[in-house]
Image (cartoon, helix red, strand yellow):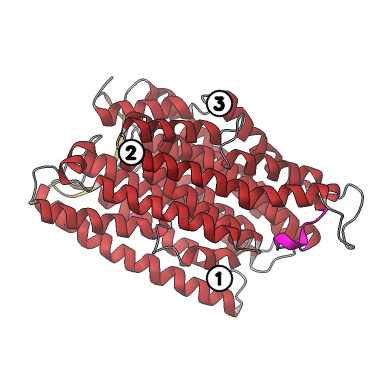
Amino acid sequence: MDVIYSSRPLWAVLVSMIAAFLILATGEKNRNIRESWTIMAALAKFLIVLSMVPVILQGKVIEYTIVTFYPGLLLQFRIDAFGMLFGVIASSLWILTSFYSIGYVRGLNEHAQTRYFFAFAMCLSSTIGIAFSANLLTFLVFYEILTIATYPLVIHSESKEGIMAGRKYLAYTLTAGCVLLFAIAAIYYMTGTLDFKAGGFIAGSGSSAVLIMLFAMLIMGFGVKAGLMPMHEWLPSAMVAPTPVSALLHAVAVVKAGVFGCLRVILYVFGPGLLHDLGIWLIMAYIASFTIIVAGFLALGQDHLKRRLAFSTINNLAMIILGAALLTKSSMTGGIIHMANHAFMKITLFFCAGALHVKVHKDYVSQLDGIGRQMPLTMGAFAIAAIGLSGIPPMSGFISKWFLCLGALEANQIIFLFVLMTSAMLDVAFFFPIIYNSFFKKPLDDVTPHFDEAPMFMVIPLVITALLSIVFGIVPDAFFRFFSLTSLAVQNIMGVG
C-alpha cells in the first residue's frame, strides 16, 4: 500500500484547536467575530479533510508523525479508508452544528457562550485526531482530550442536575480510560507495536486467555462511550446538556468515537481470523444484541424526547458493533456505513428536539400533539429521520439495515436477523406515535395554528441533514463517497482488492 507523507492530517486537527483559542481571546467583546472563528474553522477543516478523500480512494494512506518516543511507540496520524469515513462525517456535520449552535444559544440567550464554543471546537479537534490516529497510543491521547473537552458542555447549565450528570460522565469515561491505558501498555509489551492494521496485528502474541482478557478490557474501555450495556447509564443522564451538545454527543463525536474505537479493536487490532479462532465474536454479537433489544424497550418508556432519542442512539450504536462482530463482508459493510447514515439521521432528530425547545419550550413527547401544524419543517424533518432509522426506504437507514441483515444470513446466524427485525419494529413503535400525534392529533391549547418555526439558523441545518438522509438512501455514494470508503475499508480488512 502506497504511503503519502503530508502535514494535512495535522492541520485538520489543529485548525479547530487554533480557532478554540481565538474564540477564547475574542470572548464576549464581539459575538459576531467569535462565531466567525467557529464557522471559518469548520469550513477549513472540512475542505482539508475532503481534499484527502481522492488519495484514500486510490488505495493509498496518508501519514504524518508528530513525535517518536521509542521504536514502535509514536504519536502519529495515518489515514486509511475507515478513518477517512469518520473524519468526513465529523467535519461535514460540524459545519451544520456550528450554524445550529449559533441559533440555539442566541435564541435562548444562553450564558457562558464563549466557554461553550471553545469546548465545542476542542471536541471537534480531538475527534479528528481520533479519526486519523495511526495507533492505539495516539487514539488514547485524543480520546482522553475529548473526554475532558466534553465535560464543560455536559455541565453547561451549571444546575445541580447538570453537575451530577457531568460527574457521572467523568466517573464512567475516566475509569474506562484507565482500563484502556493498562490494556494498551500490555499490548505494546507483548507485540512491540500499537499500529492499527487491517485484519489485526495481535495474533500469536500471547495465550488465548491473555488475548481474551485484553479484548474484554479494550471493549470495556471503548464500550463505555459507545453505550454498550451495562456501561450506558451516563448517556441518558447527559441529556441535561444543551441540545447541540446532545447532537454532538450522539451523532458526531463522543459516542461515535466509542463505537469507532470498538470497531478499530475488532477489525484492526484483533481481526476477523483471530476473533473466530478465540470464539469471542459470538459473545460480542450477543452482548451487542442484548443492548439493541433492551435499549429499544427502554426507549418506549421515555416521555422526555431527548431521553427517548438517547436510548435510540444506544440501540443503533450496538447495531454497528453487531455488524462488526459478525465478521462477514455484508455485516461489516452495514455496520460501517451505518456510522455515517445514523449520524445524519440522529443529528436531525436532536436538531428538531432543540428547535422545539427553543421555539415552544416543549421537551416531552406528550406535549407534541398538533405541533406539526405550527412547525411543519421541523416535524417533517423529524419524520424523515425517524422513518430512516426504522429502516424504511428510500431513507439511508434502509441501506445499512439491508447489509446488516444480509450479514446475519452470511454468518448463518438467524437469531441476529431476528434481533435486527425486532429492533426495526421497536423503532416504529417509539417514533411513529410522535409523527402521528404531531400532525394528526388535535393541537394543544398553546400550539399556534399557523406557521411559526424556530430561528432559521436552526431550521436550515435540520432541513439539510434530513434531505441528505434521503439522498444517501437513493445514492449511497453521493457527495462524500461514504459507500466507496466503506467498501475499500472492508476489502482491506478481508485482505482482498
Looking at the image, is mark 2 or mark 1 nearer the viewer? 2
Q: Which residue is mark 2?
A: 413
Crowding around mark 3 (Cα neighbors within 10 Å: few <14, some 14 to 19, many 20+) is few
Q: Nearer the viewer, residue 67 or 170?
A: 170
Q: Amino acid at mark 3?
A: Phe
Placement of 479 over or under 322, stated as above or below: above
- Quarter-wise, where is residue 220 in the image? bottom left
Q: Nearer the viewer, residue 407 or 122?
A: 407
From this viewpoint, which residue is outermost toward the bottom? 160
Q: Amino acid at mark 1?
A: Ile
x then y, percent, for residue 335: 41, 38
Q: Amino acid at mark 2?
A: Gln
Among the two numbered marks 3 and 1 on one chain, the one whose residue lies closer to the N terminus: 1
Q: Which residue is mark 3?
A: 479
- Residue contact between numbered discs 2 and 1, judged by CB atoms under 8 Å: no
Q: Is residue 227 left or right of residue 273?
A: right
Residue stretch in magenta: 361-370
Q: CA distance from mark 3 to mark 2?
A: 35 Å
Crowding around mark 1 (Cα neighbors within 10 Å: few <14, some 14 to 19, many 20+) is many
Among the two numbered marks 3 and 2 on one chain, the one whose residue lies closer to the N terminus: 2
x then y, percent, for residue 88: 48, 36
Placement of 203 over or under 354, stated as above or below: above
Q: Which residue is mark 1?
A: 155
Q: CA distance from mark 3 to mark 1?
A: 36 Å
The residue sitting at 80% across, 60% down in the picture is 360
